Image: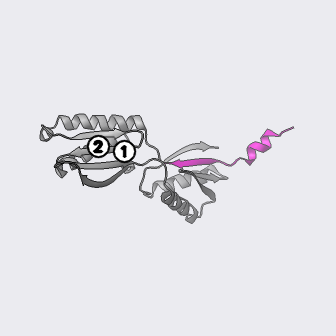
Amino acid sequence: MINFVALKNNIMPTFDIVSKIDGQTLDNAINTAKKEILNRYDFNGTKGTIDLDKKTNTLTIVIEDEMRLKAIQDAIIGRMVKQNLDPNALDFGKEEYASGNMIRKEIKIKEGIDKEAAKKIVKKIKDSGLKVQASIMDDQVRVQAKKIDDLQAVISLCRSDNFGQPLQYINMRD
């Protein structure tokens, strides 16, 4: 016979630290930014494109000059902020010259916590002196503690630091 009360008492509270971005909300933000750019006078008659590849999580911008490229980036960031998406999820690469006088820029959308950021998070948690256990699991970090107050302290600790990408705290289990 299994004693379920004893089993429940052995389970420690946990939560996961992840880095995800809602694909539909991002798509809406980029489409709204495209419409905004099409209606601007300084973009009248330009031959630029903005493409979001959902499979590779890459945004490709092709435009004539750097001034317009910067304006497009600002519009996308502004729309992301208005839709409650963290612009830190965008990894702006270098501009490269495409055919003719066009400039191409590929922007990667970061999903999942990379190994370096996960190591920084775990180190920060361990250096804090809280009585918690942090472990790296694939592209997320799992945190366990005996008290839920310690888990909440870890969340506020992680929110106070910038790890180069947006973090979400999910699957809080008591």
Could you say whether the residue bearing mark 2 is in a helix, strand or loop?
helix
Crowding at dot 1, Cα within 10 Å, few <14 / some 14-19 / many 20+, comes out as some
The magenta region covers: 1-18
Query: Along the horizontal axis of the image, is 146 left or right of 119?
Result: right
- Give the mark nearer the N terminus: 1 vs 2: 1
In this rendering, which labeled residue sits more in front, label 1 or label 2?
1
For residue 82, say whether it is visible. no
Residue that sits furthest to the front in the current view: 99
Residue at the spot of label 2: 76
Of 53 and 77, the residue lying toward us: 53
Q: Residue at x 79, y 44 (%)?
A: 6
Could you say whether the residue bearing mark 1 is in a helix, strand or loop?
strand
Q: Residue at x 49, y 55 (%)?
A: 114
Which percent across, then down, holds residue 98?
A: 23, 49
Which percent across, then down, holds residue 73?
A: 26, 47
Residue at the spot of label 1: 58
Which percent across, then down, holds residue 99?
A: 20, 48
Image quarter where the N terminus lies is top right
Which amino acid lies under the numbered mark 1 shown in the image of this protein?
Answer: Thr
Which percent across, then down, holds residue 46?
A: 15, 40
Of 111 and 165, the residue lying toward us: 111
Which amino acid lies under the numbered mark 2 shown in the image of this protein?
Answer: Ile
